Amino acid sequence: MMITVTRLNGSNVMINALLIETIDEAADTIITLTTGNKLVVKERAVQISELCQQYLREIGYIALARTSKDEEGL
């Protein structure tokens, strides 16, 4: 599963949330992937972060991480 973001020209692109290395927000939002590719998108950094969190919940990663911390007593 991937997240969908919008390029500046209005076209949608799906990216693997696990490949996001950085999100820079200035005049535009620039997503840098671990592959070195960069995407300039309309969404703000907080929106992209929320999409990534939703994706991680959907695949069960967030619940798994919380369960592991609870078991460790953290």
Image (tube, rainbow, N blue to C red):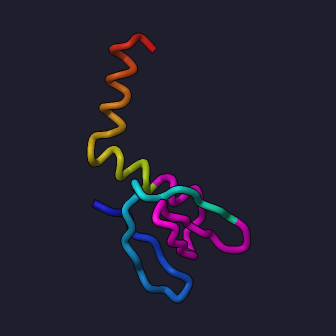
Residue under the image location 53 percent in, 89 percent down: 9
Q: Nearer the viewer, residue 54 or 29?
A: 29
Residue 65 higher or lower than 44, as above or below:
above
Q: Is residue 31 magenta?
A: yes
Residue under the image location 32 percent in, 24 percent down: 67
Q: Is residue 40 magenta?
A: yes
- Give the quarter of the image for residue 13: bottom left
What is the x, y in percent for residue 68? 34, 22
Question: Residues in magenta?
Answer: 26-50
What is the x, y in percent for residue 32? 55, 65
Residue 53 higher or lower than 47, as above or below:
above
In the picture as drawn, the residue positioned furthest to the bottom comes out as 9
Quarter of the figure with the N terminus:
bottom left
- Give the quarter of the image for residue 28: bottom right
- Give the quarter of the image for residue 40: bottom right
Residue 23 higher or lower than 27, as above or below:
above
Residue under the image location 51 percent in, 53 percent down: 49
Residue under the image location 67 percent in, 64 percent down: 25
What is the x, y in percent for residue 33? 49, 63
In the picture as drawn, the residue positioned furthest to the right comes out as 27
Residue 53 higher or lower than 34, as above or below:
above
What is the count of numbered marks?
0
What is the x, y in percent for residue 52? 43, 53
26 displayed left or right of 19: right
In the picture as drawn, the residue positioned furthest to the top comes out as 73
